[in-house]
Image: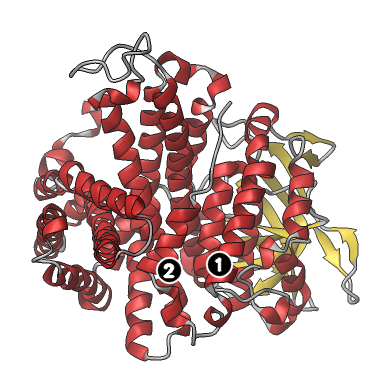
């Protein structure tokens, strides 16, 4: 049976030592985020995920959801687990106190979300999507919509969804056919069909609040004519109680590769009553608030499955006896050595370990910038943080999910034939991780967004600001002998990233296909350097703590060793990505369609 333990010590190290949340205690929300409170949150999150959610992970995979007479039933134990989630106040952790939230920094929600997703990814999607609805409404909804919907979403009493995709259009939302007919009372009648709607119908909450993209009659063609609407499953009366069922129903549950415990629905809208969010024909502006948050959450899912797969692979590698060490028996009292003595097994495990710890830092570092972009006192910090969030969201989503999936496969490989047998749980991690590369914008779209939009914004200000942060670290640590290989490797990776950026600026404008051909390699080059920079920040702090005789010496030495492994084995990949980028698109685009 698979298992999971929340990496509490790693979170403590990142939040207190690397990110130094204490530094920001004078900002709204941060004043309550004391080390004691953070410690309590970590302890309770670990207990909830390990005791309640993780035991349901295989249950959800094996049972799935069922649809009968339009009603969806979630797997055994899910409804009770959701009730526990709500009773303990987890949905309100970082929400605005004006609507019943605890008002803590969003950075802490990323900690909780990783723990939940590692324990049970399918379950974690239900409250995760609800927070996305909260974010869209808090930024773009009218005061009336906020007052009606946010208190119950914040409490977890109601859940939420995001409705974009239709059978004939996914990424190209300008092709959507869902229509909205205005009524006399400022509401609209919504008609159309949406597919792939996660948590679109279920039995865990009394109401579901759908955010739906559609076109008002007479709207401009294409994406400029798209508006966003709130469409509740049950109508809400003036006194806040629930009224009649709205005209939205679940037509089918998708049969899919993984995340079986989450209800992925076809939703039919038949003159459903909806209410405009934000301005007419400006729906994408509001939806992108939700989508950007969702993309950060999906990147986190890639990490979460890599982490839980790694933990189980380590446990197996330390127990499985097979063969002898190449340099002589390490456990002569046993009939064979544990397979963790073999270099190739260690290669697989250390690939995962160095990614997981670096990616965790990358997510929390970026999430902190998300908090600072809204709450920092000086404009310069807010601008830098906003630039980092905008620039790095596609990198986080794309790089972390691709690596998360490949890592789940590599962890499965550690088990040999047992990894292919369901009872060990490794197949589920692989299948669950696979969707993260696809939804919330397939990774190829993330790469195009990075190269086609994010690089050019504000004259390239964001990417050069990021390079400046890396330069500052390298300059400060040029004489740090304990991490010299990392500093050298990071310098090379940083130079490759700058060279790739410059190549696009010099070549992509004359031929946009050059940007498309190199975009995925650029995304992974960026992600590799970004995680290398995170390893720089972590190893720098670990060296300081060792020199000061502070903290757990073994923990800090392990951080430095893992940073050096990343420098030796992963950072050199940037040169390959650069070579591919500079190859351009000419050969790729020379094939006619009949040649494929």
Residue at horizontal 67 percent and vertical 63 percent from the top: 91
Give the number of callouts. Answer: 2
Q: Which mark is residue 449?
A: none
Cα distance in 3D space between marks 2 and 1: 9 Å
Does 287 sit above or below residue 1? below
Identify the residue at the far top of this view: 335
Q: Quadrant of the C terminus?
A: top left
Question: In the rendered image, which quarter is residue 104 located in?
Answer: bottom right
Residue 313 visible, this angle = yes
| SS assignment at label 2 | helix
Quarter of image, res 65: top right
What label sits on residue 16 in the rendered view? 2
Q: Position of residue 531 (x, y in %)?
A: 28, 55
Q: Is residue 84 left or right of residue 109?
A: right
Foreground pick, 496 / 278: 496
Tell me which residue sits at (84%, 64%) in the image.
235
In terms of secondary structure, where does tag 1 sit?
helix
Q: Nearer the viewer, residue 169 or 212?
A: 212
- The image's mark for residue 38 is 1
């Amino acid at each position: 049976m698979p298992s999971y333990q929340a990496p509490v010590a790693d979170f403590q190290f990142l939040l207190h030592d690397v990110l130094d949340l204490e530094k920001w205690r004078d900002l709204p929300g941060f004043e309550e985020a004391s080390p004691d409170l953070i410690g309590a949150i970590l302890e309770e999150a670990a207990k909830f995920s390990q005791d309640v959610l993780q035991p349901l992970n295989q249950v959800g995979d094996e049972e799935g959801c069922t649809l009968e007479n339009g009603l969806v039933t979630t797997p055994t134990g899910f409804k009770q687990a959701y009730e526990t989630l709500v009773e303990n106040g987890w949905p309100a952790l970082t929400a605005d106190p004006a609507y019943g939230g605890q008002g803590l920094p969003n950075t802490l929600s990323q900690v909780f979300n990783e723990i939940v997703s590692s324990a049970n990814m399918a379950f974690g999607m239900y409250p995760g999507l609800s927070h996305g609805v909260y974010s869209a409404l808090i930024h773009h909804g009218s005061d009336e919509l906020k007052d009606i919907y946010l208190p119950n979403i914040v409490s977890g009493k109601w859940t939420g969804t995001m409705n974009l995709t239709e059978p004939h259009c996914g990424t190209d939302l300008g092709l959507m056919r869902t229509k909205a007919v205005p009524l006399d009372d400022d509401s609209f009648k919504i008609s159309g069909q949406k597919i792939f709607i996660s948590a679109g119908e279920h039995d865990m909450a009394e109401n579901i609040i759908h955010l739906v993209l559609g076109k008002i009659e007479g709207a401009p063609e294409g994406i400029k004519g798209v508006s966003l609407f709130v469409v509740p499953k049950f109508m809400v009366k003036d006194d806040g109680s629930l009224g009649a069922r709205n005209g939205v129903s679940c037509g089918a549950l998708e049969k899919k590769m993984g995340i079986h415990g989450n209800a992925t629905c076809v939703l039919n809208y038949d003159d459903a009553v909806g209410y405009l969010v934000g301005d007419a024909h400006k729906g994408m502006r509001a939806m992108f608030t939700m989508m950007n948050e969702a993309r950060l959450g999906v990147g986190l899912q890639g990490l979460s499955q890599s982490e839980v797969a790694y933990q189980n692979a380590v446990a197996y590698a330390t127990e499985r006896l097979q063969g002898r060490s190449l340099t002589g028996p390490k456990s002569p009292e046993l009939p064979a050595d544990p397979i963790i003595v073999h270099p190739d097994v260690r290669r697989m495990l250390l690939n995962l370990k160095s990614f997981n710890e670096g990616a965790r830092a990358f997510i929390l570092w970026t999430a902190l910038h998300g908090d600072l972009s809204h709450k920092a006192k000086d404009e310069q910090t807010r601008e830098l943080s906003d630039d980092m969030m905008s620039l790095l969201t596609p990198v986080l989503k794309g790089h972390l999910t691709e690596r998360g999936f490949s890592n789940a496969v590599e962890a499965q490989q550690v088990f040999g034939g047992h990894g292919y047998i369901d009872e060990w749980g490794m197949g589920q991690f692989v299948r669950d991780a696979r969707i993260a590369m696809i939804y919330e914008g397939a990774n190829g779209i993330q790469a195009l967004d990075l190269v086609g939009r994010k690089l050019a914004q504000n004259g390239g200000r964001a990417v050069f600001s990021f390079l400046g942060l890396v330069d500052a670290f390298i300059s400060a640590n040029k004489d740090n002998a304990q991490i010299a290989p990392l500093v050298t490797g990071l310098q090379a990776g940083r130079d490759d990233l700058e060279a790739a950026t410059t190549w696009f600026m010099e070549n992509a404008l004359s031929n946009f296909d050059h940007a498309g051909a190199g975009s995925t390699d650029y995304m992974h080059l960026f992600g590799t350097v970004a995680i290398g920079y995170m390893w720089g920040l972590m190893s720098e702090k670990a060296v300081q703590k060792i020199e000061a005789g502070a903290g757990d010496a073994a923990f800090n030495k392990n951080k430095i060793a893992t940073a050096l492994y990343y420098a030796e084995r992963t950072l050199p990949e940037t040169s390959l990505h650069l070579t591919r980028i500079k190859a351009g698109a000419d050969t790729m685009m020379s094939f006619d369609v009949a040649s494929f």
